[in-house]
Image (cartoon, rainbow, N blue to C red):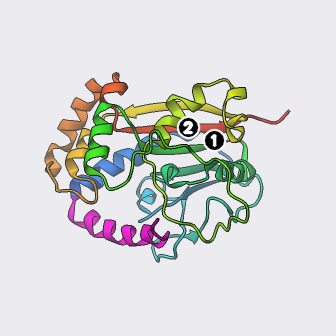
Amino acid sequence: MPDISQHNLEIHANRAAWERKPALRRIYRRFYQEIAAALPDGSRGLTVELGSGMGNIKEVLPACITSDLFQNPWLDRIENAYALSFADQSVANLILFDVWHHLQYPGAALREFRRVLVPGGVVVLLEPAMGWLGRFAYGSFHHEALGLEKEIAWEVPQNFDPSRQTYYAAQGNGWRLARKIMTLPPAERPTALTDWELMRVKYFPSISYLLSGGFRGPLLLPNFAVPIVQAAEKLLAPFPMLTAARMLVVLRPREKT
C-alpha cells in the first residue's frame, strides 16, 4: 500500500490542473456552495475543513479553517482526523470533501469528531456516489478502488500510530454509509455509529464534473457549457440509483442524556 505522502503529491498535481481548467473551478464552486448551504444557521463554534488539499473552500466560506496532514503555504494548519488538536466542544462544523473514503478507520475518526463538536454540531461529507453513472465512471476511469464489497475496519488496530498512516481509498464508503449503514436501526450499526444521526443526503448526477475530467482526465466540457449541463442535471437528480455520481451527507451526534 502506498505511503500517505502520496496524498501530498496528488495535491500538488491537482493544483496544476485547477489552474488550467476554469470549468473545474466553476463546478467545485457549486459543490462548496452546496456545503455552505448545509451548515446549520447560527452555528456557534469554528468551521473546520479536514483534508483541504488546495484550500479552495475559502472562496465560499472565507472563515473556514483549512487543514491537511501536510504543511502547505495555502493552508491554515496541520490536522489529523484521528488526533485533532481542537479543544472539546469547540467546533460547530466539520467538513470533509473527498476525505471520508480515505479514512481507513472511520470509527476512530468519528470519536474525535464527536469530542470536538459543540452540541448540535455537524459533520458534512461530500463524496463520490455510486449510482449507475457514478459506479461506471469511477470504476472505469478513476485510479482508486470502489471498495463496495470490502469490509470496513471501523476500529484502529492495536498500537496504531495516527502519524504513520498508509494511503487508503475506497470510493464507495460514503455511499455505503448513507444508503445502507445509517438506514439500519442503531443497535444493528457498527458501534462507532450507534450514537450518530443521518440528517440529510443530497445526490448530484455531476455530469458536468465527469465531463470536466476531474483533476486527472481530459477536459470534455468548455467553461461556457457548464451551467447548461448543470441545468440538465436537475432533471436527473430525482433518480439517484441511476444517475448519482456525487453526494452530500450531513451527520450529527445524538445528544447524550
Classed neighbour count for the residue bearing mark 1: other residues with Cα under 10 Å, few (<14), some (14–19), many (≥20) = few
Q: Nearer the viewer, residue 131 or 123?
A: 131
Furthest-right residue in view? Answer: 257
CA–CA distance in space, label 1 to label 2: 16 Å
Tell me the residue that label 2 is attached to: 250
Amino acid residing under circle 2: Val
Taking the image as shown, residue 52 lies to the left or right of residue 79, namely left
What segment is highlighted magenta in the picture?
1-21
Amino acid residing under circle 1: Gly
Q: Nearer the viewer, residue 91 or 96?
A: 96
Tell me the residue that label 1 is attached to: 42
Rendering coords of residue 67 (x, y %): 54, 65
Q: Is residue 5 in the magenta section?
A: yes
Location of residue 76 by image quarter: bottom right
Tell me the mark number nearer the camera, choosing from 1 and 2.
Answer: 2
Location of residue 202 by image quarter: top left
